Amino acid sequence: MAEIDHYTPADRHAVDQMYRRVFGPDAAEANKLRWDWQYLRNPNNAAGSPEIWIAREGPTVVGQYATMPVRLHVAGRDVCASWGMDVMVAPERQRQGLGEVLFRTWDEHVGASLGLGLSEGSYRLFKKLRWPDVGPVPCLVKPLTRRAVRRPSWPMPINRLVSALTLPLIRLVARSRPVEGELATIRRFDDGFTALWESVAPTFDLAVRRDAAYLNWKYAEPPHVRYNIVVLHGIGPHGATAARGGAGLPRGYAVYRHVQEPRGRVTLLVDFLADPDDPDALRALLRFVDVEAREADSDKIRTFAMHAGFRHALKKAGYFQVKSTMEFVAKINGSPVPATFYDNKDRWHVTLGDSDQDR
Ligand SMILES: CC(C)(COP(=O)(O)OP(=O)(O)OC[C@H]1O[C@@H](n2cnc3c(N)ncnc32)[C@H](O)[C@@H]1OP(=O)(O)O)[C@@H](O)C(=O)NCCC(=O)NCCS
């Protein structure tokens, strides 16, 4: 019978070996590059140690559940939550109940257990354990060139026909619009972003706390990806200066990067924040990202957004909602929420930047 306890530094080699066996050598190499940053340097680690559960049989490691602790703003309170990320069971011990024990142990120790972008196995296991299924997180795409609508599964003549037919619409949607507002690119987030978060948090029913420490760790310091960050300063409508904090404070930010995919070049709008009641702020940030995407020669911009207000602003800016595969489960333990809490996600702010989806 396996025992579950906390990860210790002495487990590192055994966990690396198991990761290689379960996920393959390429994923294992990528995991090694991220590991210290992802697990040791998370500013939300309690007592500075990573939140990883290990299943052992005697001296042998046979499973792990590695999680990402976050502060979660939920129903007006902050709780200690975590994203479940790298869960694995040694191949010869799978489908014998160990995963279930790991999931339950993790859940018993957190104020909210969250899962994003799940594998088939873990999604089924979450369902079996009756975690509220609140996903998927809607995906939105803004086409910029005729290549944006190509599909690898279609023969080239069909792709050409669809490109030709949709070109007038794409040109209309992708036309340049003036960039307005006090926008600047930055490399790090200062304390003004904590003030921005504090001021907008009450407008969300559920969102990870995006304070400066979290944002720097997540978007300025990761070793495996390089992000661009744009900030909007200035005075919003209704005199809502910089999220009600003052003219020097940020009114919003967007985090993005450009990637080459088999179907073409894509700008990923990974994360963003502004007051949902200040749609001009998000619009200004989106226009800046449009310009950057065009300069990077991207065929489209892709983002994920759960909040209804943000999705509305995105659609007004030329984004279309497409099928999403980013499944999302959430279970709140540390704050009393009614069963109906999971039914209306219009005021939940979840993006591609959450958990470790963008890696
Ligand atoms: C996902 C994983 C951690 C589950 O651990 P486990 O010990 O095999 O799971 P359990 O035996 O406790 O639970 C089994 C339940 O999980 C689900 N499940 C597990 N693996 C599955 C798979 N490959 N396909 C479909 N469902 C699966 C089923 O609901 C299953 O119930 P059933 O056996 O009654 O059909 C394990 O299978 C694993 O390491 N998989 C490979 C790595 C992986 O995909 N990790 C998830 C990354 S997000």
Image (cartoon, rainbow, N blue to C red):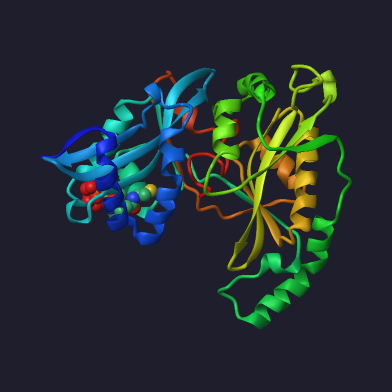
Q: Residue at coordinates 21% horizontally, 51% vertically from top-left?
A: 95
Q: Residue at coordinates 46% horizontally, 26% vertically from top-left?
A: 44
Could you tell me which quadrant the N terminus lies in? top left
Q: Quadrant of residue 166?
A: bottom right
347 lies left or right of 15 = right
Q: Is residue 325 visible?
A: yes
Q: Residue furthest right?
A: 178
Q: Is residue 111 visible?
A: no
Residue 66's spot in the image, x, y percent? 35, 39
Residue 160's spot in the image, x, y percent? 71, 78
Q: Residue at coordinates 48% horizontally, 27% vertically from top-left?
A: 43
Q: Residue furthest bottom?
A: 157
Nearest the viewer among 211 and 263 is: 211
Query: In the image, is residue 259 above or below residue 116?
Result: below
Nearest the viewer among 131 and 199 is: 199
Residue 41's spot in the image, x, y percent? 46, 33
